[in-house]
Amino acid sequence: MTKSWKKYILWFAQEHVEFRLAEINSLAKLFKLQLRILSSSNEELLRPFWTVELPDEESALKLASRSISLKCILEHWSDSNNFGDFHSSLKTYLKTNELSQQYFHKDLSFKITVETYNKHFSQKEKVQKIETFDYLPLKGDVNLKDPSVEWWYIEYYGLDPTKVPETPDAILFGRWIADGQRHLIKDLSLKKRKFIGNTSMDAQLSLLMANQALVQSGDIVLDPFVGTGSLLVSAAKFGGFVMGSDIDYMMVHAKCRPSRITQKTREADESIRANLKQYGCEKRYLDVLVSDFSNPIWRDSFKVNSIITDPPYGIREATEKICIKVSDKPDTRNEDSAHYPSTSHYSLQHLYLDLLTFSARHLVIGGRLVCWFPFHRDDYNDGMIPQHECLKLVSNSEQPLSGITSRRLLTYEKVEEYSEDAERSTKGEILEFRPRYFDSGLESRQERRTRRAQLREIGRLEAIKRGKVLDVKDGKYKKVIDE
Amino acid sequence: MKLSTYNFLTSKSIRGVKVGYPLKLVVSKQDEVEAEFNPTFIERLLPKLEWSTVYLSAEVVGLQEDIPKEFSDDIVSNQDVLQKLHHLLLEVDILEGQLECPETGRVFPIKDGIPNMLLNEDEV
């Protein structure tokens, strides 16, 4: 195969580092790009930059048009771990790549951005660094605001701020091509969103999820635990037609208790549809429904391109399904009174296996399921990850939530058509999250309460010793002030 | 509720119900919204639809003249019909009304454009 590859530098934001590889691989698949990642060791993948090879600049532009983890893409001109080799390889690049000469035209204004990662330099020092490039045949004017050509000079001083090396671990130079889509994080920020709830997913993660689900124009995207529709927003932003369902009637109708501290009641026009309208995606809103995920409501021919969801873990939102409850009390309902069906606990084990079976049934071949999976860090092993015969796990990235709890973003791709026999072929030993979350901290609740009570008692005795008196109004010990 | 969603909804989760399709649609208030016309979307959607239900819902909202009674492959290449289908399936919004299970007569109300498919505990 005679194929020409061009080198590029991907410059990332150092946030949600573990999600990077999954996102870039998903985008390469979405745009059918040939991509070779040259930075392949684990240490290199954690760095804020990767060197990659792509067939052409168009591919690089496509990648940047969707990526949330990317800050920008640079055309690679030179890199090395020492200054001598760096400059000589840049000189060689200028000599051997005649096309590079076009960027030094006298009518093109330019800018050189100096980025020193993990080490601070003053503006004066940065200018001195630029002056080491006196061999660049620069002819145009400097324009810092809106240059026609922008070069980036990067010195990378490792990731550990307590061990900054004397000289950089890596030095890179490249021509800026395009920025990633990080502006969307701010554009879709929950802070300004019309309708949010306790479990609304933040914009960055929900955009990453939409990328991992390969959402593109004309797709149908479903969230079966839709809540306030935060995952639908990013899917619709990328061109998906979105729909959702949830068991919580008040939530779907946006009548539940407001989550903002400043807000006492929900406004009349709050809704999932209003969220999409806010971001100009209302024309891709299909529907939301009130329904219990454990009871199927769809015809078998109902097929969606992606399922993006964050099931309830039982902490901030209850995991529930409709279930019969036997009670000795007489039934006081009559035909006219509104009836609220009783719900019971929907175990995570059943919920995830139902979700996988549902996805196997209703995804198109090649369609993806992207969902979060909560767990206790001490318990984790790969056998916990739910599996289904028709679904292939394509990525599994962890986001720590606290010292002991964590969640993983799982991405599955449907590889095989669903048949009834496949129904039983799910596995995964999923442990309940809620009891572990509340009861198995470093100390139990009982221990914590006893310890705190002891501390309070010590405080009280000390206060009395120092002659303070209990103020009954607020329950605090205070100095007696003579009037 | 859009009529594209309606086309896929069943009441099969009610205990004892086998097919639960098509649900009987009763409309008391409807609206028109604007939806993005996306040829890829509509072409993918067409083969999954139950055509008799498409026609049935067109009759309920009074748009049956726009829609051919039988499905044929010509529809996919006929831009005019595609536009009309797009309007019927994505731009007619049922705000108030109900869906009725064809086997048990159980009613699922539609309120503020959102169907409530929840069952009572003694029905599951």
Image (cartoon, rainbow, N blue to C red):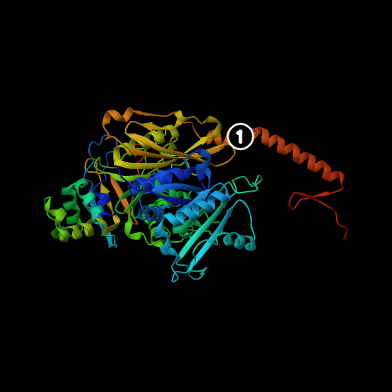
Q: Nearer the viewer, residue A70 or A151?
A: A151
Question: Viewer-proximal residue, B19 or A426?
Answer: A426
Q: Quadrant of the C terminus of chain A?
A: bottom right
Question: Residue A54, position in %: x, y?
Answer: 38, 49
As displayed, is residue A14 above or below residue A442? below
> Percent position (x, y) of residue A89?
50, 51
Q: Quadrant of residue A293?
A: top left
Quadrant including the N terminus of chain A: top left
List x then y, in percent, for residue A159. Answer: 59, 46
Q: Which residue is mark 1?
A: A441
Q: Which amino acid is tagged 1?
A: Gly
Which residue is found at the position 21% from the left and 58% from the top? B61
* Residue in the image at 39% along x and 59% along y: A99
In this picture, residue A174 sits left or right of residue A478: left
Where residue A356 sits in the image (x, y, percent)? 36, 36
The reply, left or right, for residue B80 in relation to residue A415 is left
**Secondary structure at numbered mark 1:** loop
